[in-house]
Amino acid sequence: MRTVEEVEALASAAHAGQVDKVGVPYVEHVRAVAAGLVPFGDRLVMAGLLHDVVEDTAWTAEGLRAAGVPDDVVGLVEAVTNQPGVPYEEKIRRITGNREATLVKIADNAHNSRADRAAALPEEARARLGAKYRAAREVLWAAVDRADVEAVVTIVNPALLDELREGRAAPS
């Protein structure tokens, strides 16, 4: 069984050389997602660190299991991984069937919705992604306790707290 530190090293190696949409080393995104999951324990932190590894690297779920990542953590990674031919909205609805996967996706969405990240995108992409992430938040946030959402967004993207308190999906 892997420790959080070992999983972070695995995620760092897996995402080595990758940058996100705004040119930041990709590992910073997965670290931010993981940080938002600290209140929920090591299993969710590991899932946050690995949430994009199957989707965006050569790693497979089977490879993660063989590397000693706990099966339930790999299951959470699989739950939030895009599947070919499955529309994003359907993926979000599917994720909400699993509380822990929903928390991972809320942390991912919160980091992707940060204004400082969005500001680096072209206006058209900023508007398109902002609408996509707002719509996802409406579904994700309704699927778990408000206190859990607040715990995540307080760490990952405190600017979303007003949206949460007002019960609306505000512009990103």
Image (tube, rainbow, N blue to C red):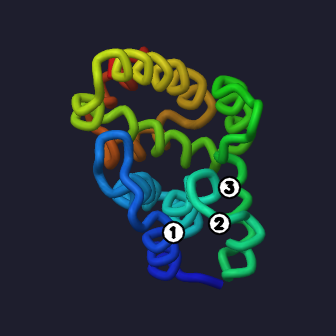
The numbered mark, 3 or 2, whose residue comes first in the sequence reads 2
- Which residue is painted at 71% across and 53% down in the image? 78
| SS at circle 3 | helix
Q: Does the residue at mark 1 contact the one at mark 2 (Cβ under 8 Å)?
A: yes
Q: Amino acid at mark 1?
A: Ala
Q: Could you tell me if residue 62 is visible in this image?
A: yes
- Which residue occupies 37% across, 40% down? 21
Q: Earlier in the sequence, mark 1 or mark 2?
A: 1
**Relative to 39, does residue 120 appear above or below in the rendering?**
above
Q: Image quadrant for the C terminus?
A: top left
Disc assigned to residue 59: 2
| Residue 50 image offset from top left, x and y in percent | 55, 62
61 lies above or below 126: below
- Callout 2 amino acid: Trp
Residue in the foreground of this view, choosing between 48 and 147:
48
Residue type at numbered disc 3: Leu
How many other residues sit within 10 Å of disc 1, few (<14), some (14-19) or many (≥20)? many
Residue toward you, 72 or 19: 19
User: Residue 106, percent across and down?
Assistant: 50, 39
Q: Secondary structure at mark 2?
A: loop
Which residue is disc 1 drawn over?
14
Do callouts 3 and 2 mark residues in contact (Cβ within 8 Å)?
no
Placement of 131 over or under 91, stated as above or below: above
Q: Badge 3: few (under 14), some or many (20 or more) residues near its Cα, within 10 Å?
A: many
What label sits on residue 76 in the rendered view? 3
Closest to the camera, between mark 3 and mark 2, is 2
Q: In the image, is residue 93 above or below residue 1? A: above
